[in-house]
Image: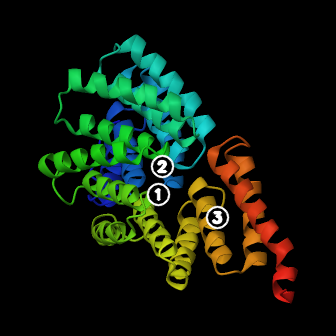
């Protein structure tokens, strides 16, 4: 997918699109490209609902004008698949990403950068589905290919290193993840600069590794820096900014600062419902996080109600065997056990 500078106002792309429709007509390849650019701008701003319809229209037009196997048509499929993924529609994303990868292997070859990108995108969907071994295997292959084709300091190669570190992190291999993230962060600061979104994301990932090792003060300091940078660079309502608020709130929680955690978790949940919708996996995760804070405050009945809702949503959206669904089952059981013991605890010995 062609990268579009998200800082450029969408008004420019809208104006170009209107002019091309007037001068070149709707089905001219340049007009279609302008539609794709506008959709990519919405996407980069974290506005996932608006570009879906545009990408769908672009794909239909390119199939008609350029045919199915044209690289631009395939790119439109890839863009639509990334939107499905961002919306948490992982099965639809996987199906379309599989098709894109198959077409790119046929049309462009195994070592073309776009083909390698398609492998990376498919691996990201495996990761989001909790299929960590499949994701790791594919991410390893992507990193090997990018080192061969693009070299070590190319932004996409660095991105692959970061992506592999996220798998180590998800599997609880925190020391391996930390080493990778530190190397990635040093490379990104050198190649991309301190305020590039990818550099900021790597800072957040490194903080998450500290968090999971129980190094909460170190994590908190980095999360606060990340959040300040993302508010400046991406804006308050960008999904990445909201994710950093969620991570900072989790750090407060693990330090026993429950009131501060609850306040920030409430804000995160409100923002995710507004930006991503009720059934997005990240929104569901925020509900679970809020329930965890209620749990630790001894507000068991409130926590139980939310956990039950979370579990129902996760079974529907992620499936019964997803790691997050299984974890919610465990949390709900612990809450119900606490509620059963509550009368005897109140009565005392």
* Separation of marks 3 and 1 at Cα, in angstroms: 24 Å
Quick one: 278 or 248, which is closer to the camera? 248
* Residue density around tag 3, few if under 14, some if 14–19, many if 20 or more, within 10 Å: many
- Give the quadrant of residue 245: bottom left
Q: Which mark is residue 323?
A: none
For the residues carrying marks 3 and 2, which lies nearer the camera in this image?
3
Q: Which mark is residue 47?
A: 1
Residue located beneath label 3 in the image: 288
Identify the secondary structure beneath mark 1: loop
For the residues carrying marks 3 and 1, which lies nearer the camera in this image?
3
* Separation of marks 1 and 2 at Cα, in angstroms: 7 Å
Depicted 136 relative to depicted 258: above or below: above
* Residue density around tag 1, few if under 14, some if 14–19, many if 20 or more, within 10 Å: many
- Measured as percent of width and height from the top left, residue 21 is found at 37, 43
Identify the secondary structure beneath mark 2: helix
Which residue: 73% across, 64% down?
Answer: 307
- Kindly check if marks 1 and 2 are in contact, taking CB atoms under 8 A apart as contact: yes
Colour mapping used in the image = rainbow
- Give the quadrant of residue 214: bottom left
- Quadrant where the C terminus sits is bottom right
Which residue: 42% across, 48% down?
Answer: 39
Quick one: 297 or 238, which is closer to the camera? 297
* Residue density around tag 2, few if under 14, some if 14–19, many if 20 or more, within 10 Å: many
Q: Earlier in the sequence, mark 3 or mark 1?
A: 1
Which residue: 50% across, 81% down?
Answer: 257
Residue located beneath label 2 in the image: 51
For the residues carrying marks 1 and 2, which lies nearer the camera in this image?
1
- Determine if residue 309 is in view: no
* Separation of marks 3 and 2 at Cα, in angstroms: 29 Å
Identify the secondary structure beneath mark 3: helix
């Amino acid at each position: 997918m062609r990268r579009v500078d998200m800082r450029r106002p969408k008004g420019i792309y809208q104006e170009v699109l209107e002019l091309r429709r007037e001068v070149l007509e709707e089905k001219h390849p340049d007009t279609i490209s302008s539609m794709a650019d506008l959709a990519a701008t919405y996407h980069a701003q974290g506005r996932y609902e608006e570009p879906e319809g545009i990408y769908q229209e672009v794909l239909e037009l390119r199939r008609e004008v350029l045919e199915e196997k044209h690289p631009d048509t395939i790119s439109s499929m890839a863009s639509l698949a990334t939107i499905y993924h961002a919306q948490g529609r992982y099965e639809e994303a996987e199906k379309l990403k599989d098709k894109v990868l198959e077409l790119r292997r046929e049309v462009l070859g195994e070592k073309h950068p776009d083909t390698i990108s398609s492998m990376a995108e498919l691996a990201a969907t495996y990761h989001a589905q909790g299929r960590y071994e499949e994701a790791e295997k594919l991410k390893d292959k992507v990193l090997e290919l990018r080192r061969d084709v693009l070299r070590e300091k190319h932004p996409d190669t660095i991105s692959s290193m970061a992506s592999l570190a996220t798998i180590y992190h998800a599997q609880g291999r925190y020391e391996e993840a930390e080493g990778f993230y530190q190397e990635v962060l040093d490379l990104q600061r050198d190649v991309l600069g301190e305020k590039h979104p990818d550099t900021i994301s790597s800072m957040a990932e490194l903080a998450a590794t500290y968090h999971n090792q129980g190094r909460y003060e170190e994590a908190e300091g980095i999360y606060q820096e990340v959040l300040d940078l993302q508010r400046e660079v991406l804006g308050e309502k960008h999904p990445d900014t909201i994710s950093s608020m969620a991570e900072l709130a989790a750090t407060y929680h693990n330090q026993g600062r429950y009131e501060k955690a609850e306040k920030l978790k409430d804000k995160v949940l409100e923002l995710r419902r507004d930006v991503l919708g009720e059934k997005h996996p990240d929104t569901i995760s925020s509900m679970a996080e809020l329930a965890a804070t209620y749990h630790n405050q001894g507000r068991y009945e409130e926590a139980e109600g939310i956990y039950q809702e979370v579990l129902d949503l996760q079974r529907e959206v992620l499936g019964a065997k997803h790691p997050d669904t299984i974890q919610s089952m465990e949390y709900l059981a612990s809450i119900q056990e606490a509620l059963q013991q509550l009368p005897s605890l109140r009565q005392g010995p």
